[in-house]
Amino acid sequence: MDTKEKTSKYLFQNYARNSLCFTHGSGPYLYDADGRKYLDLVAGIAVNSIGYSHPKWVKAVSEQAARMAHVSNLYHVKEQADLAERLASVTPKGMCRSLFVNSGAEANEGALKLAVRYTKRKRILSSLNSFHGRIASSLGATGQVKYRESFEPLISDSFDYFGFGDIEDFKSKITKDTAAVILEPIQGEGGVRLASREFFRTVRDICTDNGTLMIIDEVQTGMGRTGEWFGIQNYDVMPDVMTLAKALAGGAPIGAIVSTPEISSVLVPGTHGTTFGGNPLACAAGCATFDIIKEEKLVPRARSLGKKWMSDLRKVTGTDITEVRGMGMIIGIEMKEHAKDFQNFALSENVLVNVCNMNTVRLIPPLILSDEEADRFTELFRTFISKYN
């Protein structure tokens, strides 16, 4: 029985998997069982920012696994403290406390609990077209009906929604009972959509005046992807809470809630916790990932390559292209009709891309991508678009 047959027989059928099955990866490439090599511009959905099998990451994880993979949070965990110290060196000023969990959805759920406990309020405000995870409260914060509708009795009572980037709509929805506003710096799952600096600064000012916490979901945009360590830094805005996951540990499952000493102090023993969150293995992977990003200067690299890549993509003209948008190494190409067709065409050329929000080709590759590999995609896209001109 091969992997596909076992998947069909033994696993829940909740993923729309294609026919591929990979055996290993190296750099920005994945390899299937037949030895075919694929340029991966999905990176495990913005996870594998340092690529596959980076030797420093493999060494750190292997050595940690040989020492101790897990120990309870009943004790002090060196690797956890080391990763928190690293994060504190690059987070916005004053945001020097971290709580490690297992995923982005869990980080968002914990951040919402933190906000409710800190403010002693019950309402959460989120933007339409957003995505914050699939567990109960983070799903409630997700501003897309298609994800929520079959679970509504469980998750709908505490949430209100406003148009992303719409200052007047935001002003009309926030109240004195709003505990927190949760926002992505860029709506990734929503189609790589950006809002203005004025919008984020206005939200910050109104939250401050209202006593409402501003939570920034950096699950997809954090750890250098936008050309800054965190996406919100592109807007010169100081949040109250940030949530991280995906690229934080280069492929090991981890998430984090980051906040100030004052706000974090309300989570006293017994109010929140996790068995596996911040275990030595995941945190060792996180430390190695952080060090590689810093040593290889991948944050400025994301900024410079992303700027060039978007400029090159915007020079590709065609009637099916609506817009090319993004920041750093998260780029969306919105198409009128043929996004899925292009995804299939790219696959036929051994290039992996993702389509989100029905019609947007989302590029979220490893940050180690070369100029030549970016150019390869651009020429592939140009070839495809020429068919429809």
Image (cartoon, rainbow, N blue to C red):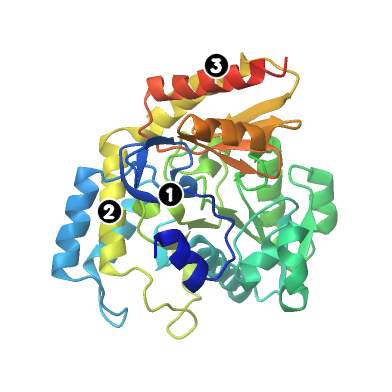
- Quadrant in which the N terminus is drawn: bottom left
Which residue is at a point 72% across and 78% down the rendered structure image? Answer: 154
Between 110 and 188, the residue placed more toward the observer is: 188
Q: Is residue 137 left or right of residue 236?
A: right
Residue 278 lies, in percent from the top left, at: 34, 68
State the CA–CA distance, disc 3 to disc 2.
34 Å
Q: Quadrant of residue 152?
A: bottom right
Which residue is at a point 71% across and 17% down the rendered structure image? Answer: 318
Compared with 10, 212 (above or below) is above
Q: Residues within 10 Å of mark 2 (few under 14, many from 20)?
A: many
Between 255 and 262, the residue placed more toward the observer is: 255
Q: Nearer the viewer, mark 3 or mark 2?
A: 3
Which residue is at a point 66% across and 76% down the rendered structure image? Answer: 120
Residue 309 lies, in percent from the top left, at: 51, 22
Q: Which residue is mark 2?
A: 287
SS at mark 2 in the image: helix
